[in-house]
Image: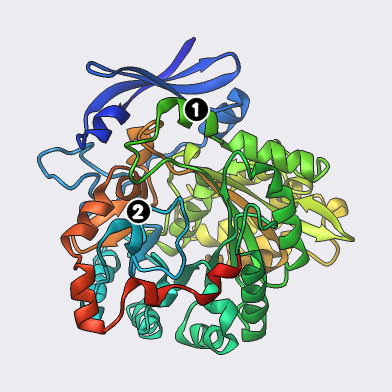
Amino acid sequence: MKELEKTQSVCPECFKEEKIEKIDARIVEEEGKIWITKECPKHGFFKDIVSNDASLYHRWNKYKVTGDGVKNIEIKSWFSPEDKLYFHHQSQSVLTNVMLTNRCNLRCGYCFMNAGAAGYVYEPSLEQLRKIMQQVRDEKPVPSQAVQFTGGEPTIRKDLFEIIKMAKEMGFVQIQLNTNGIKLADSLEYCQKIREAGVQTIYLSFDGVTKQNNPWIEQNKKAIENLRKAGITSIVLVPVVMKRSVHELPEIVKYAIQNIDVIRGVNFQPIAFTGRVQNVSTDYVKKERVDYVDAIEALEKGLDGQVKKEDFYPVPFVYPISKLIENMKGKKQVEFTAHPSCGGATYIFIEDGKIIPITRFVDVEGLMEFINKQSKKTGLIKNTRIALAFLAEVSRYVNKEKSPKGFDMIKLLIKTAKTGSFEGLKEFQYRTLYIGSMWFQDVWDMNLERLKRCVIHYATLDGVIPFCAYNSLGVGEKIRQKYSISFEEWKKRTGRTMEDDLWKGAGDN
């Protein structure tokens, strides 16, 4: 067993006792795999998988960068100021999650967050939501640019359109809606109103192509058709990947390819054991754990080798692009400084029914090294020198003969360099399918070095919280409880019960 780095974690058994005990941990390599090991004085030794392929881990980990974080607002890792897990969060709020309600129109057996399971109603008012979102818009040096409305099920709120418009007026340039799709399947008019209000991207729960793994598959398909008719052409399918469903990942990608006119990506999420984990054993976690390697290998096998592990790169791989734009504009940009173990992705083109990953015709590592070099240029005419360098050298990193027909990557890169903005890459986004992953942490595999680099944050009435602290360390539940009301009070205010929210078609599945 080879130690790669020291870090800190938490004890899962202490967490079950409603205590957060920060303990020393190690990232180690053993028999071609990467593990996190830790030992609690009270509960003993724990060992969990980080990566089933050490070579992939090492290749990704070399792109780790440390950001400056937010200057004027504390990103809170825990709800007690006297018991911090760490002292300074190192990444911006690249994507801000805002939970609109814990009410839902479904009752999925594994869900701990919906009101029916929680035993209370959490639903911030419009005034509270404005306060929640203003926090991240006030962040310096870079305000949060992207917001994702989530739940529960956000479409259950009657004032959703007003909330979306509010976010747009507050300056968010990317507005996303995370939904199970039931309401979207029921109404084309509703989809049209969502687009008119300002939503650009739909994050659609999509756990498989069969009813066994995705009981709502027909509703998903109907929702996608309605969104197409409504003119929303940016849908991301979000499968939670479990042992029983990992084999369906290739079929999900194939379905996305068939609908590439409106589906922009598949963002698979290996399962994390969060919520009420008192009855979850360490042995069960080991048995059911799925990591990136499991998911990518399933894709490689099911897509006949057209996509391989070598095609995937971690989130911070694109960090030099942000630094280049920052250098040219003289203004701090959104920086993707997540820990390499947080997620990775590739982009694929489709030509004559075949998959062409971007890595097949672009030397992406060489290109990123070139961009990084340009991002460090200084002087009065640096922008001109950068543009000239792109004109002279960028073709070295793109194989035009292997490029998809009708797609000029060299032209897009030169346009980006000339304009000093991401606008030139929009055509790229709409010609490709993004295949990505985001593996959120739980108390078994928690690495505080990862947590402090989290770029997906929840904005709440009690501050801004990293995603894995909000969902995996119980912070979100304590905040929701603090600002909740009872079912009886909800009924008194609205005249409705939790049963009134349920989708009437659920019994058909």
Q: In which quarter of the image is residue 390?
A: bottom right
Residue 456: where, in percent of width, then height?
39, 54
Q: Any mark on residue 372, and which?
A: none
Residue 342 vertical position relative to residue 267 in the rendered view, above or below:
above
Residue 186: where, in percent of width, then height?
57, 81
Residue 296 appearing in the image: yes
Q: Which residue is drawn at 45% across and 56% down?
A: 327
Three-letter amino acid code of the residue under disc 1: Lys
Q: Alpha carbon of mark 1 to alpha carbon of mark 2: how far?
A: 32 Å
Numbered disc in front, either 1 or 2: 1
Query: Which sits in the foreground, 138 or 401?
Result: 138
Q: Which residue is drawn at 35% across and 53% down?
A: 92
SS at mark 2? loop
Residue 147 appearing in the image: no
Q: Which residue is drawn at 39% across and 81% down?
A: 160
Query: Which sits in the foreground, 147 or 478?
Result: 478
Q: Any mark on residue 286, and which?
A: 1
SS at mark 1? helix
Q: Quadrant of residue 354?
A: bottom right
Three-letter amino acid code of the residue under disc 2: Gln
In this view, which residue lies farthest toward the front?
Answer: 507
Q: Mark 2 points at which residue?
A: 92
Residue 318: where, in percent of width, then height?
54, 49
424 sits left or right of 299 in the view: left
Crowding around mark 1 (Cα neighbors within 10 Å: few <14, some 14 to 19, many 20+) is few
Q: Quadrant of residue 505?
A: bottom right
Query: Which sits in the foreground, 410 or 139?
Result: 139
Residue 501: where, in percent of width, then height?
40, 75
Q: Label 2 near label 1: C-beta < 8 Å?
A: no
